[in-house]
Image (cartoon, helix red, strand yellow):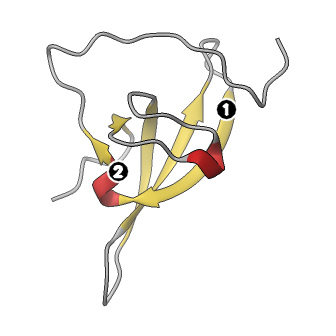
């Protein structure tokens, strides 16, 4: 089962190639089915101002929907100048 398109998701693990960490949030914009292996997800990552930072592809197992007991947090993304 995958999340609804265009909803907020939370990363369940670090994605070092994209400078993303477990707990970061993104918008789920596309499901990538596969015949063999694990399906994928295309995510759009935004900064605190709502500007797009990246569009990344991750395994579907690397995301989950937010839970009621999650608290959003802010961290500095190293690729973006302040």
- In the displayed structure, does residue 79 sit left or right of residue 75? right
Whether residue 28 sits left or right of residue 36 in the image: it is right
Residue at left offset 55%, top offset 41%: 44
Of callouts 2 and 1, which one flags the residue occurring earlier in the amino acid sequence?
1
Q: Residue at x 65, y 16 (%)?
A: 76
Q: Secondary structure at mark 2?
A: helix
Q: Quadrant of the N terminus?
A: bottom left
Question: What is the quadrant of residue 7 in the picture?
Answer: top left
Disc 2 vs disc 1: which is toward the camera? 2
* Mark 2 and mark 1: Cα distance apart in space: 20 Å
Residue 70: x, y in percent?
23, 16
Residue 18 image offset from top left, x and y in percent: 63, 46
Name the side, left or right, on which 65 lies relative to 12: left
* Residue pictured at 32% horizontal, 40% vertical: 12
Q: Quadrant of residue 13?
A: top left
Between 6 and 8, the residue placed more toward the observer is 8
Which residue is the extreme one toward the bottom? 35
Residue 35 horizontal/vertical position (percent): 31, 89
Q: Secondary structure at mark 1?
A: strand
Image side of residue 48 versus residue 81, left or right = left
- Kindly identify which residue carries mark 2: 62
Local crowd size for mark 1, using a 10 Å CA cut-off: few (<14), some (14–19), many (≥20): few
Residue where numbered disc 1 is placed: 52
**If the image is split into quadrants, where does the C terminus sit?**
top right
Q: Assess disc 2: are there few (<14), some (14-19) or many (≥20) residues with their C-alpha within 10 Å of its C-alpha.
A: some
Which residue is depicted at the point 31% across and 89% down? 36
Residue 23: x %, y % from top left:
38, 28
In the image, 70 versus 46, the foreground residue is 70
Q: Name, please, the residue furthest toward the right.
A: 81
Q: Which mark is residue 18?
A: none
């Amino acid at each position: 089962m995958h999340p609804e398109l265009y909803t907020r998701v939370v990363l369940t693990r670090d994605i070092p190639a994209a400078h993303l960490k477990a707990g970061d949030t993104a918008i789920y914009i596309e499901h990538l089915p596969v015949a063999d292996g694990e399906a994928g997800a295309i995510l759009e990552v935004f900064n605190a101002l709502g500007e797009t930072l990246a569009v990344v592809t991750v395994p579907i197992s690397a995301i989950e929907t937010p839970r009621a007991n999650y608290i959003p947090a802010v961290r500095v993304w190293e690729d973006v100048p302040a």
